[in-house]
Image (cartoon, grey):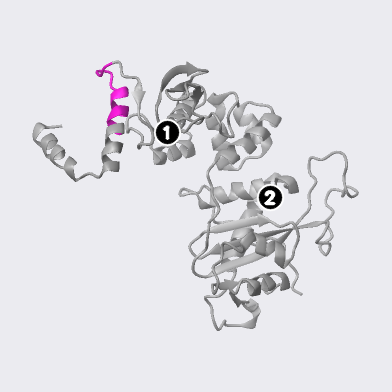
């Protein structure tokens, strides 16, 4: 930087707040740590934004994964190390939470750190759902597999691991991804309950009912034992909530949705007695759109096309797994929600929406 510009930049420091000055000092500390011409250093502050020359920008990381420009092996370890550095810079010590952290060598190709306060050593994945997983050089392939929505056999082949390992990685990786459900909705809210046939896939003993023959269907009217209710709610801004209900009744719907939808909200549903009972208890303005065959709608803004299109896309996406066990259904709903709501969603929007999820029968 030229001296004149540097002096001009220095003159603006007095305008910074105390928090901004603290972040600036920590950013300079990180830059000094990785400057080959600087002193021996070794300490760095935490909770600042990552240094530009040290941490991979999220957009470039996303595009690298999508384009497949990074390979396994050393590049995979480099990718994992960059993700880890970013987490340490943001969160500090996983044991005591302090930001007094310094570099402490490497183990297995991944950097380790040491806390100056509690004096414990750790890596960036300590106390996370992926702690203890091996073959970190193949984690990038696992991330690509999740983004592509591959089956277990495909993921195992891509990562060159056993299918049981691919299954365990899938659960741990999805648990580690941050995808919080919305705390509240705004504007017009749509909700619908779908009935998913109960699946005991993977269970070999202790079946509560006789096994179905391949191709047979569950009893559509036996909601208590053979159909699992799943509620999906969305507003017009794209905020999405889904939950597997213990039973199809107003109490279960209230337990799932009561804190999400403010009173007096315009609430669109299909008119099922359970969901209407919940809406009445929550003091919502209920709108039940008529069937399309009824002709032109008097209030076309009140419909449930948005939520049903989401259900259809999710159902079509799940079709590749040839059935999802009821035990793992919340995990797969979360997986699809992550892909659907990601800034660079890899989920195609041109699915055939014919059929959709099974609807709750109107009563």
Q: In this rendering, would 113 be left or right of 326?
A: left
Q: Which of 263 and 125 is in front in this view?
A: 263
Q: Is residue 33 magenta?
A: yes
Q: Can residue 149 be seen in this view?
A: yes
Q: What element carries label 1?
A: helix
Residue underneath mark 1: 86
Name the residue: 26% across, 39% down: 21
Magenta stretch: give its range.
27-39
Percent across and percent down for residue 304 are: 59, 69
Q: In this rendering, would 360 be left or right of 342?
A: right
Name the residue: 60% across, 43% down: 149
Residue underneath mark 2: 319
Q: Which quarter of the rendering shows the C terminus?
A: bottom right
Task: Residue at the far front: name it.
Answer: 117
Using the rendered view, name the quadrant where residue 32 is placed.
top left
Q: In this rendering, would 159 be left or right of 59?
A: right
- Name which of mark 1 and mark 2 comes first in the sequence: 1
């Amino acid at each position: 930087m030229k001296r004149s510009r540097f002096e001009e930049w220095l003159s603006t420091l007095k305008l910074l707040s105390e928090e901004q000055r603290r972040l600036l000092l920590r950013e300079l500390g990180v830059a000094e740590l990785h400057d080959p011409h600087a002193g021996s250093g070794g300490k760095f502050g935490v909770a600042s934004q990552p240094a530009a020359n040290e941490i991979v920008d999220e957009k470039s990381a996303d595009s690298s994964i999508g384009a497949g420009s990074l390979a396994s092996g050393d590049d995979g370890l480099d990718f994992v190390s960059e993700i880890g550095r970013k987490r340490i810079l943001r969160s500090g010590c996983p044991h005591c939470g302090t930001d007094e952290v310094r570099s402490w060598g490497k183990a297995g190709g991944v950097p380790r750190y040491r806390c100056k306060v509690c004096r414990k050593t750790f890596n960036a994945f300590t106390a996370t759902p992926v702690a203890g997983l091996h073959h970190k050089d193949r984690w990038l392939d696992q991330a690509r597999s999740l983004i592509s929505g591959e089956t277990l056999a495909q993921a195992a082949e891509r990562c060159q691991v056993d299918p049981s390992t691919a299954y365990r990685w899938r659960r741990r990786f999805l648990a580690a991804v941050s995808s919080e459900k919305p705390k509240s909705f705004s504007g017009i809210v749509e909700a619908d309950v779908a009935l998913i046939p109960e699946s005991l896939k993977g269970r070999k003993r202790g079946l509560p009912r006789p096994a179905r023959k391949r191709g047979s269907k569950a009893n559509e009217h036996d909601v208590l034992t053979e159909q699992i209710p799943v509620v999906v709610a969305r507003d017009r801004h794209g905020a999405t909530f889904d939950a597997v209900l213990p039973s199809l009744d107003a109490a279960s719907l209230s337990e799932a949705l009561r804190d999400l939808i403010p009173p007096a909200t315009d609430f669109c549903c299909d008119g099922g007695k359970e969901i209407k009972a919940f809406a009445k208890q929550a003091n919502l303005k209920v709108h039940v759109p008529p069937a399309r065959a009824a002709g032109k709608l008097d209030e076309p803004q009140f419909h449930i096309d948005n939520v049903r299109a989401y259900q259809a896309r999710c159902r079509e996406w799940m079709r590749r797994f040839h059935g999802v066990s009821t035990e793992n259904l919340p995990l797969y709903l979360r997986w699809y929600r992550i892909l659907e709501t990601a800034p660079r969603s890899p989920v195609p929007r041109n699915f055939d929406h014919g059929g959709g999820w099974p609807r709750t029968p109107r009563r």
